[in-house]
Amino acid sequence: IMKINNLKHNLILKRALNVYQKQHEAISKNIKNVNKENFKRVNTDFTHDLTTAASELQYQHKSLKTNHDRHLDEGPPWVSKIPNKESDGTEVNLAIEMAELAENQIKYEFTTRMLNRLYRGISTSITGRV
């Protein structure tokens, strides 16, 4: 059981869920305080956390395997394409925050589905039933 919990895909997906939860909390805080004067926007860019997780796995020689040299060619899937303002005291842009919240929700749901699929596969392997 311990080896199953430490599978490389499992570790990345678990870390991704934690990062997406942090992002959700930060974005929600920004939206909640959109009308407050002097509120400094909370930075919601947590890509460093996921990149670090992927790097740790590569260091442990557990890099993600692909079956074609062009797979994963565009960089990590957790890098947002939405413009992001830094937390330098700028105003909160509600439209950008809502777009980030929607994108983050999609990523979170996708990650939970991938974890579910991983655990179903493990269950199927153990029981032999689909």
Image (cartoon, rainbow, N blue to C red):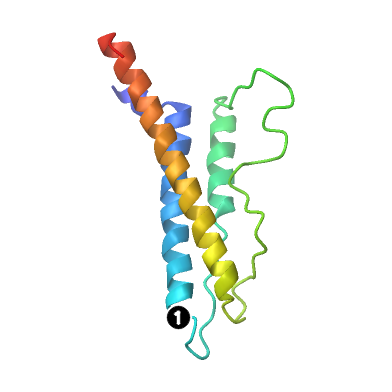
The local secondary structure at tag 1 comes to loop
Q: Is residue 82 left or right of residue 23?
A: right
Judging by the rendered image, the residue that carries numbered circle 1 is 33
> Exactly how many numbered labels are in the figure?
1
Q: Quadrant of residue 58?
A: top right
**Image coordinates for residue 76, horizontal then vertical, percent:** 63, 41
- Bin the neighbour count of mark 1 within 10 Å (Cα to Cα): few under 14, some 14-19, many 20 and up: some
Vertical placement of residue 80 versus 126, above or below: below
**Image coordinates for residue 47, horizontal then vertical, percent:** 58, 52
Residue drawn at the location 45% of the way across and 47% of the way down: 108
Residue drawn at the location 44% of the way across and 33% of the way down: 114
**Image coordinates for residue 19, horizontal then vertical, percent:** 46, 51
Vertical placement of residue 127 versus 113, above or below: above
Vertical placement of residue 47 versus 126, above or below: below
Query: Quick check: can you spot residue 6?
Result: no
Which amino acid is tagged 1?
Asn
Q: Quadrant of residue 111?
A: top left
Q: Is residue 85 left or right of residue 113?
A: right
Query: Quick check: can you spot residue 119?
Result: yes
Residue drawn at the location 42% of the way across and 77% of the way down: 32
Q: Is residue 22 left or right of residue 69?
A: left
